[in-house]
Image: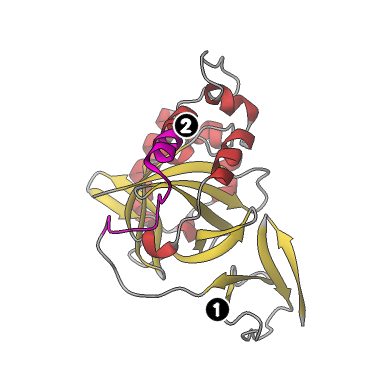
Amino acid sequence: MGETHTGGNARVLRTRRGHQSTRRPDLKNDVTHTLDPNTTMRVHVKAVSHDRRRPQGTGTRLGSASMTDTRTALTTLEQFEHATPTGASPGAGSAAASAATAGAGPVLEFFDSLPPAPVEDMLGSWHGSGVPTGNPLDGMLEAAGWHGKRYHSTDDAHPLVMEGSRGLYSLNPALVPMTLMARMSSLVTRPPVAAVARRLMPLLSTKRPAARLRMVEYRGVVTGTMIYDALPINDHFRAVDEDTLLGAMDFRGMESPFMFVLRRER
């Protein structure tokens, strides 16, 4: 039938291509979802309610830690966000300030210390920004006009909400050569190139959902995850507080995840 193993730090089940998936009796609360129609990788994810949109800012489980712990986490996150990029001279005074020169390790340790983010508390609109770790994608999305993400329901997710001259729009990830862009990130982030990209990308917009939200095990913890429909990418989240998420973009072929922050828009 198949065998369970770990790939990219997420628990997956490998089956033969075209094999019809069925519920396993020992996983009564789980369902099987295909990550990519062109692969044989499948992931067991916890079944969640597929209720339609719920009001923003009404989550009760995100950020359930004490106020002191939450403030400490927010302060640490801000330090990571303002860390000196790899290759530059970090400022003095904070261990987190030099995190970017150490790669994603310190940020992932902070990520691991945070509680999981239930998908039902992730619905709504979010503003995004990268956390510098020396990843090839550092600064690239912002240069291209990335605004954030929008989750109308667990099956209606828009991963690339962009800023355009006529307002916000959703970019179709299936039409974005992410692997090529990552390899050419130093070119893409140059202002003249980024300006051209900003003008052209609205042609690749879509009104259709391009991802889903599911509970997936990543780095030993089952947490809210956005699974792209057309790309080998999972965005795993942990809760800093009820309005702030730390994300780890697990991109197949990338040595370490791209780290980013989502802040809820009211």
User: Does residue 5 lie above or below 200 as drawn?
Assistant: below
Q: Amino acid at mark 1?
A: Asn
Horizontal arrangement in the rendering, residue 22 relative to residue 77 (left or right): right
Q: Amino acid at mark 2?
A: Thr
Horizontal arrangement in the rendering, residue 99 relative to residue 71 (left or right): right
User: Does residue 176 lie above or below 147 as drawn?
Assistant: below
Query: x and y percent of residue 28 in the render?
Result: 58, 82
Query: x and y percent of residue 173 in the render?
Result: 47, 57
CA–CA distance between discs 1 and 2? 35 Å
- Which residue appears at 31% of the width and 73% of the height? 52
Numbered disc 1: secondary structure: loop
Horizontal arrangement in the rendering, residue 111 relative to residue 200 (left or right): right
Question: Which residue is labeled 2 in the image?
Answer: 76
Disc tally is 2
Question: Which residue is labeled 1 in the image?
Answer: 29
- Which residue appears at 60% of the width and 39% of the height? 109
